[in-house]
Image (cartoon, rainbow, N blue to C red):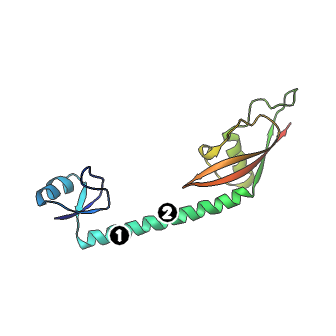
Amino acid sequence: MKVLLIKDVPSLGKAGEIKEVKDGYGKNFLIGKGFAKHATTEVLEAHKAEEARKAEALAKEIADLKALAAKLDKMGIKIHKKLGDTGHLFGSVTKEEIAHALQEQHHVEIDKKHIDIKNPIKTVGLHDLDLKLGHGIHATLHVTVVGD
């Protein structure tokens, strides 16, 4: 009996593979427990269509992220912070402040988890930050900190 694996099965194969198994094992265990489906032509065609749809969605997502990265590389944001008597900031600029400023100034929503601050921003001036957008795509955001 041929089955299409829906989930990974140790010592048999990974999801998406077609395997030849004994009838009892296929019907009673794999199909019964939801690990596989009987490999009919309809099931195989539906699986291929689903894989094609997933690949198309992934390609669209990567293209959108690359476009966003190109847009972010050209952008800059300004953040106003209070200064102490010595000219240093009170505290440091946080990821939340950067994400909020990006949303407020350019209407681009970035999750604060994607912002990578290597060294804490505690001085006024221009700082370049790395944004990890996913799928190995990075962008550079120019942050200007202005003291009040």
Of labels 2 and 1, earlier in sequence is 1
Locate the C terminus by quadrant.
top right
- Alpha carbon distance from label 2 to label 1: 15 Å
Residue 147: image location, x then y, percent: 85, 37
Residue found 25% across the figure and 73% down from its top: 41
Residue 22: image location, x then y, percent: 13, 59
Element on which disc 1 rests: helix
Residue found 24% across the figure and 58% down from its top: 36
Check if mark 2's residue and mark 1's residue have beta carbons within 8 Å.
Answer: no
Answer few, some or many: residues within 10 Å of disc 1's Cα (few below 14, many 20 plus, some between 14 and 19). Answer: few
Badge 1 amino acid? Lys
Q: Is residue 38 left or right of residue 118?
A: left
Which of the two residues, 94 or 139, is positioned nearer the viewer here?
139
Q: Which residue is mark 1?
A: 48
Q: Is residue 16 left or right of residue 113?
A: left
To which quarter of the image does residue 125 belong? top right
Residue found 31% across the figure and 72% down from its top: 45
To which quarter of the image does residue 63 belong? bottom right
Q: Is residue 80 above or below residue 42?
A: above
Q: Is residue 82 above or below residue 40?
A: above
Q: Which residue is mark 2?
A: 58
Q: Is residue 67 left or right of residue 89?
A: left
Element on which disc 2 rests: helix
